[in-house]
Structures are given as structure tokens and as C-alpha cells.
Amino acid sequence: MVRLLVMRRFEAFRHNPLSVRKAMAVIVAATLVSVLVGGVLITVVDPEEFPNLGTGLWWALQTVTTVGYGDVTPEKTAGRFVGALFLLEAIAFVTIVTAVITSSFVERARQERIADSETAEAAGIEQLTAQLAEITSRLDRIQQTLESGR
């Protein structure tokens, strides 16, 4: 359910222009979701090493941020397996969110460059049109002068 909510927000960010503030909010939310899921999961799977949710959340925060102080670690195979899966999932999840945000910033910059170049191109065409009109006018005057001189 939480992941679905995050994915919906993720899609909304892909379709709307991102600000740095919104991007930061998404990264923080992705990290928090990972910490919450990991903390609950390790507390359920290895209750001897993680007797309460606080300890599980502390371990998950250390794991997702890859700090790993080592003060709380899973000792049983099931806990280590959950830890390995959680570490890989959390890093992948936060990395993918960050990559999508970065690519949206790059895309927005590309679109702005295109818009700027189209504006410059339109101004150039306008200038060329004005010059062409002036040249045509001069040629008409020259032709009239030549015809009246005959």
C-alpha cells in the first residue's frame, strides 16, 4: 500500500516539472518508507536480536544509509538474509528514485534549451524577413528609377 502511494507520487513527478524542494521530499520519503519497512520486517523475522521496533528501525536506518555502525546486527541466518535483501532493495529503490529525479531535471533543462533556441530562431526569422522586405523595397525603387530613366 505504501509502495503504491510512493509509486503514484513518483509518476506525478515524472509528468510535472520538478523543483529541488519536491525532489528532496521524494528522496526523503523513499528513504523513510525503506526504513519503516525494513525496521518492521527485521523485528518480525529476528525478534531475539531486535526485541522492539525502535531497535529494528535504528538498524534499518543504519542499513539504508549504509552507515552500519555495527551496534545492532542480525546474528541468525534469517536475519542476515532479510538484511541482505533489505540492503539491496533499499539501495536500489533510493537510487532509482534519485536517478528518475535527476533525469527529469536534465529533461527540463533540455526542453528549456529547445524553447530558448526556438525563440532565438523565431527572432532570427523575423529579422531576416524584415531585411528581405527592405531589400525587396530597394529593388522595387531601383527598378522604378531605371524604368523612369528610359
Image (tube, rainbow, N blue to C red):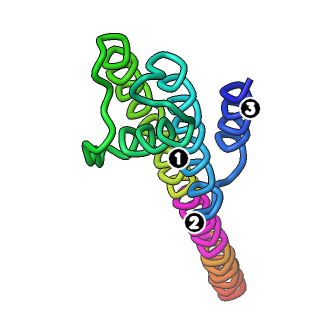
Q: Could you classify mark 3 by the number of other residues whose Cα lies within 10 Å: few (under 14), some (14-19), or many (20 or more)? A: few
- The amino acid at mark 3 is Leu
Q: Which mark is residue 116?
A: 2
Query: Which marked residue is nearer to the observer: mark 3 or mark 1?
Result: 3
In whole angstroms, how far apart are the C-alphas of marks 1 and 2?
Answer: 23 Å
From the viewer's perspective, is 1 left or right of 72?
Answer: right
Above or below for 66 versus 73: below
> Residues in magenta?
112-128
Badge 3 marks a residue whose secondary structure is helix
Q: Earlier in the sequence, mark 3 or mark 1?
A: 3
* First in sequence: mark 2 vs mark 3: 3
Look at 40% across and 18% down and name the residue there: 82
Disc 1 element: helix
Q: How far across and how far down the image is residue 97, in percent? A: 51, 39
Q: Residue at x 67, y 87 (%)?
A: 145
Marks 1 and 2: which is nearer the front?
1
The quarter of the displayed image where residue 44 is located:
top right
Q: Which numbered marker is on residue 101? A: 1
> Which residue carries the number 3 mark?
5
Q: Nearer the viewer, residue 32 or 47?
A: 47
**Where's residue 49, x and y in %?**
39, 27
Give residue 133's position: percent from left, percent from top: 69, 74
Decide whether the magenta segment is chiefly helix, strand or loop: helix
Residue 71 lies in what quarter of the image?
A: top left
Q: What separation in Å lies between label 3 and label 1 (alpha carbons)?
A: 17 Å
Q: Crowding near pointer 2: few (<14 within 10 Å), some, many (20+)?
A: few
Quick one: 39 or 97, which is closer to the camera?
39
Classify mark 2: helix, strand or loop.
helix
